[in-house]
Image (cartoon, rainbow, N blue to C red):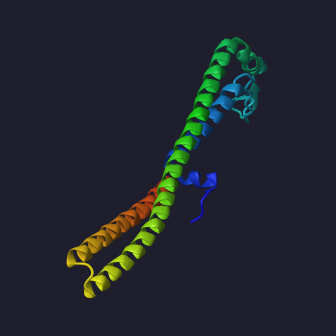
Amino acid sequence: MSVGLPIELLSRRPDVRQAEASLMQAFYATNSARSTFYPSITLSGSAGWTNSGGAAITNPGAWLLQAVGSLVQPLFNRGQNIANLKIAKAQQEEAVLAFKQSLLDAGQEVNNALIQWQTAREQILLDMEQVKQLETTVSDTRLLMQYGTVNYLQVLTARQSLLSAQLTLASDRYSEIQGVINLYHALGGGADQ
């Protein structure tokens, strides 16, 4: 496992993906509000009505009124369109800030998990060195007791210190495993894709 993870790994997190989807929705809503400033002209295949004989009866006046109405409608709705655009822009800015906040929160969770894992790794190395030294101490104390210079209580004390160091090592290994699990979870692992 390497330190310094790329930010693209955060894209697997459900909260980041949800914030990204909200940002896209706000972007499209802003574009939709912006498009209301333009006239809407719809082309259709019908140019009029037909009579009972099948001949087309056109009403150019109605068609012209409809075309002029759709062309000038944005002018009459200008105030409402401006207000809708301002609202959409504000919602888009809110979505941008929410997306940035979700990235920051996700990054902090990943950082905390990495720190937990790194700290546990460093502590394990120190604990292993301590266990190694205490094993040597227990062995030396046993030899000293065998040749009569120390009593059995000192051997028991050395063994107790060794056992305590081994328990600390096991606890730090648990912390390391927990850090890896937290890192996996913080990177969005286990989430349905």
Based on the displayed image, in which of its 4 quarters is residue 65 positioned? top right
Residue at (75% x, 23% y) in the render: 39
Q: Position of residue 106 (x, y in %)?
A: 53, 46
Residue at (64% x, 15% y) in the render: 80
Query: Is 10 left, or right, of 157 in this rendering?
Result: right
The residue at the far bottom in this view is 147
Based on the displayed image, in which of its 4 quarters is residue 129 positioned? bottom left
**Which corner quadrant holds the N terminus?**
bottom right
Query: Is 53 left, or right, of 121 in this rendering?
Result: right
Residues 8 and 4: in front is 4
Q: Is residue 117 at all visible to an observer of this figure?
A: yes
Query: Is 141 left, or right, of 39 in this rendering?
Result: left
Q: Position of residue 115 (x, y in %)?
A: 51, 54
- Location of residue 29 with respect to 112 vertically, above or below: above
Q: Position of residue 72 (x, y in %)?
A: 75, 15
Query: Is 171 left, or right, of 83 in this rendering?
Result: left
- Location of residue 54 with respect to 57 vertically, above or below: below
Residues 149 and 14: in front is 149
Residues 36 and 116: in front is 116
Residue at (72% x, 30% y) in the render: 42
- Location of residue 190 with respect to 13 vertically, above or below: below
Residues 141 and 124: in front is 141
